[in-house]
Amino acid sequence: MATDAQKKKFDGSQESAPAKHDPGKPGAAKPAVAKKPDPVIYVGPNLSGDILISQFAVFRKIPDYIAKKVKEDRHFARLFVRVNDLASARQQLSTQGSSLARSFQTVLSGVKGVK
């Protein structure tokens, strides 16, 4: 006869423990692996002064002093795109009136220390 715990398991009212990885069994669940964040590239103008950054600088992790500005300024934040999206971003930058082109111009005209 089934125990109460077994009955709960079969009627779906209680979740079972996650499957352990057994490399000998085909189709066995694999342990979760933390995915590294995608690298990003800055497509904005060259900046110096409070923030020193060059156009097309690539980051695996954005430095804290730049991340602070990213949180404060949505136009600056838009200028960081995934490396895989660089071709699309360059096309948008060359399209007058696109949101990325407007953000570029806003940062260019508003940030202290533009080269």
Image (cartoon, rainbow, N blue to C red):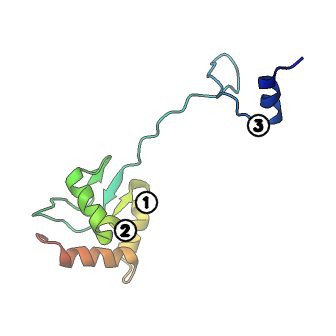
Marker disc for residue 85: 1
- Nearer the observer, disc 3 or disc 1? 3
Residue shown at 82% from the left, 20% from the top:
3
Image coordinates of residue 67 in percent, x first then y, are 27, 56
Identify which amino acid the numbered label 1 is placed on. Answer: Asp
* Residue 98 seen from this side: yes
Give the mark nearer the N terminus: 3 vs 2.
3
- Nearer the observer, disc 3 or disc 2? 3
* Residue 43 seen from this side: no
39 sits left or right of 15 in the view:
left
Relative to 1, residue 99 above or below: below
Q: CA distance from mark 3 to mark 2?
A: 52 Å
Identify which amino acid the numbered label 3 is placed on. Answer: Ser
Relative to 71, residue 2 above or below: above
- Residue located beneath label 3 in the image: 13
Name the secondary structure under disc 3.
loop
Q: Are marks 3 and 2 in contact (CB under 8 Å)?
A: no
Image coordinates of residue 11 in percent, x first then y, are 83, 34
Give the mark nearer the N terminus: 2 vs 1.
1
Image coordinates of residue 79 in percent, x first then y, are 32, 66
**Residue lying at the far bottom of the rendered structure:** 97
Residue shown at 40% from the left, 73% from the top:
92
